Amino acid sequence: MWHAIFVIQIPVLEKIVRTVLVYATIVVLFRLAGKRGLATLNTLDFVVVFLLSNVVQNAIIGSDNSFSGGAIGAATLVGINAAVNRLVARSEVASRWFEGSPTTVIADGTPLSREIRRLGLRRGDLEQAVRLQNGEAIDEVASGVLEPSGHLIVTLKPSERSATKGDIDHVLSRLASLERQTAGGERASHPS
């Protein structure tokens, strides 16, 4: 029993190479699939992610069902992922290649149909993102940018933005100033 658990049934180097190749293949496939990252996965996307792990399992482990072989595969996956994440954090070129770059999908209240089709977005996705970010309709948006992470960042037109605490404080300060000026003017015109 212990022999079957711990004795690696294929060479360690083969196990590592298989794992790295599968990792690289999946990265390329996800990169080609587009920016709809984990932030915007729908039911169909979840099905693909769940089945993908089963599909590539044999490509990683080969005929090796040992615990040691699985541990080597897992360690290789974690190690290669950590190395790629560090590379992406340090290199703008690597970041663009692995993650992509932001894409404008709404400009001056108009959805950019070509970009939306290319990214596989639905108009409903855009409308929901606008509502989540305090807008009511797409025509209120100055710009909408889909980030490489899959998040849609919306900037409302200035006329559509809600007042901030700073805006209100500024207005109150101006009102107080006008009241002082008005009160001072009334005293000057009505001497006691």
Image: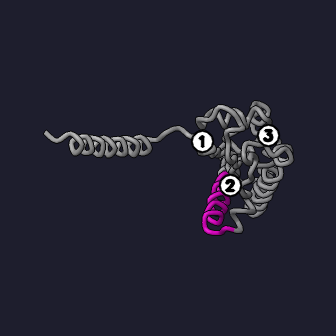
Task: Verify whether residue 75 appears in magenta.
Answer: yes
Quick check: can you spot residue 191?
Answer: yes
Where is residue 15 drawn, in percent x and y?
75, 57
Which disc, if any, is residue 77? 2
- List x then y, in percent, for residue 113: 84, 44
Q: Which residue is at a point 63% across and 60% down the rendered structure image?
A: 85
Highlighted range, magenta: 74-92
Helix, strand or loop at label 1? It is: helix
Amino acid, disc 2: Leu
Image quarter in which the N terminus is found = top right
Q: Residues within 10 Å of mark 3 (few under 14, many from 20)?
A: some
Dividing the picture into quadrants, the one containing residue 27 is bottom right
- Find the residue positioned furthest to the left: 192
Residue 111 x %, y %? 78, 42
Residue marked by disc 3: 121
Q: Which mark is residue 159?
A: 1
Q: Residues within 10 Å of mark 1 (few under 14, many from 20)?
A: few
State which quarter of the image contains the C terminus: top left
Give the residue drawn at x 73%, y 42%.
109
Q: Nearer the viewer, mark 3 or mark 2?
A: 3
Q: Pointers 3 and 2 in contact (CB under 8 A)?
A: no
- Residue at the spot x=71%, y=37% of the render? 138
Q: CA distance from mark 1 to mark 2?
A: 49 Å
Q: In terms of sequence position, does the residue under pointer 3 or pointer 2 come before the other?
A: 2
In the image shown, does 174 or 131 lie closer to the viewer? 174
* Foreground tag (1 vs 3): 1
